[in-house]
Image: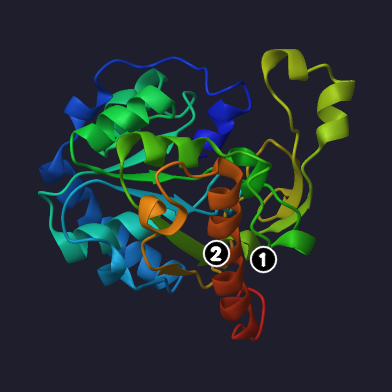
Amino acid sequence: MNGEGIIETSGWGGRVGGNERSGWDPKFIEQVGKWVRPAVRTWFRAEVRGIERIPAGGPVLLVANHSGGMITPDGLVFAPAFYGHFGYDRPLHSLAHYGVVMGPLSLVMNRLGIIEASPDNAAAALDDGAVVLVFPGGDYDAYRPTTAANVIDFNGRTGYVKTAIRAGVPIVPLVSIGAQETQLFLTRGHRLAKLLRLTKFRLEIVPVSVGLPFGLSVFFPPNLPLPSKIVMEVLDPIDIVAQFGDDPDIDEVDAHVRVTMQRSLDRLAARRRFPVLG
């Protein structure tokens, strides 16, 4: 579950996990990509369009919607396309919840360029000249109900705008469709989380979904994703200062980003004939 949005639910607090960026290992990423790329192309029939719209050099903040629940395929689809286009000497860092980058898999995640989501980590990666991929909606977005599968909703989180302004980098929107069809998402489970008093542990949702092979899942066990066709599209860069002036309004920039992404997602949805099949 990637995304600064998860950290922002607690005020963009979280832990700053040291210099995780130093673990980025392009040779390891290239090796992993050799089996990830054909796998996602086969299983998800994945397409990434408009990759050339990402500025050819310098730091960039990629802002994407997040889909697919616990086993979200967003990064698996996008990263191989990014490195295939720009090569393995340009770092791509994805921001993730600290639960993803801690424990026995932490070293593997760091080598893949996945770092803990926090404003300091994002700013440091951008200062290093990296491309940073952020999912402002976090788990709130990834577990949106199937009835709202094609809705851009960051749950009011605007930290990504502040990060881009502070770093002086363009925002490049990235939209994805198809991953929310990998299972049937019934509810985020806000009421259930409150009933179980999990909110005091910063667990705001207990998502309920239906899929294969376990059927009904109340957060656990996670079902395996159906082979839904996934399409991701990179949109034109947004130069915040050029479009909104030297003292931009955070909410105005956020609204513009979301509207731009929603229009693109609506267009992709209109071309989609059937769920899963695409």
Who is closer to the viewer here, 253 or 188?
253
Name the residue at 46% across, 36% down. 162
- Image: 82 above or below 266: above
Name the residue at 31% across, 57% down. 36
Residue 261 position in % (x across, y down): 55, 64
- Image: 34 above or below 223: below
- In this rendering, position of residue 170 left or right of residue 153: left
Q: Badges 1 and 2: C-beta atoms under 8 Å apart?
A: no
Q: Quadrant of the C terminus?
A: bottom right
Residue 222 position in % (x across, y down): 63, 42
Read off the residue under disc 1: 150
Q: Check disc 1 and give the amino acid type.
A: Asn
Q: CA distance from mark 1 to mark 2?
A: 10 Å
Name the residue at 48% across, 54% down. 64
Residue 143 position in % (x across, y down): 68, 47
Q: Check disc 2 and give the amino acid type.
A: Met
Read off the residue under disc 2: 261
For residue 99, say whether it is visible.
yes
Secondary structure under tag 1 reads: loop
Q: Is the residue marked by circle 1 packed among few (<14), some (14-19), or many (20+) residues within 10 Å?
A: many
For residue 66, say whether it is visible.
no
Who is closer to the viewer here, 53 or 232?
53
Who is closer to the viewer here, 7 or 238?
238
- Image: 148 above or below 27: below
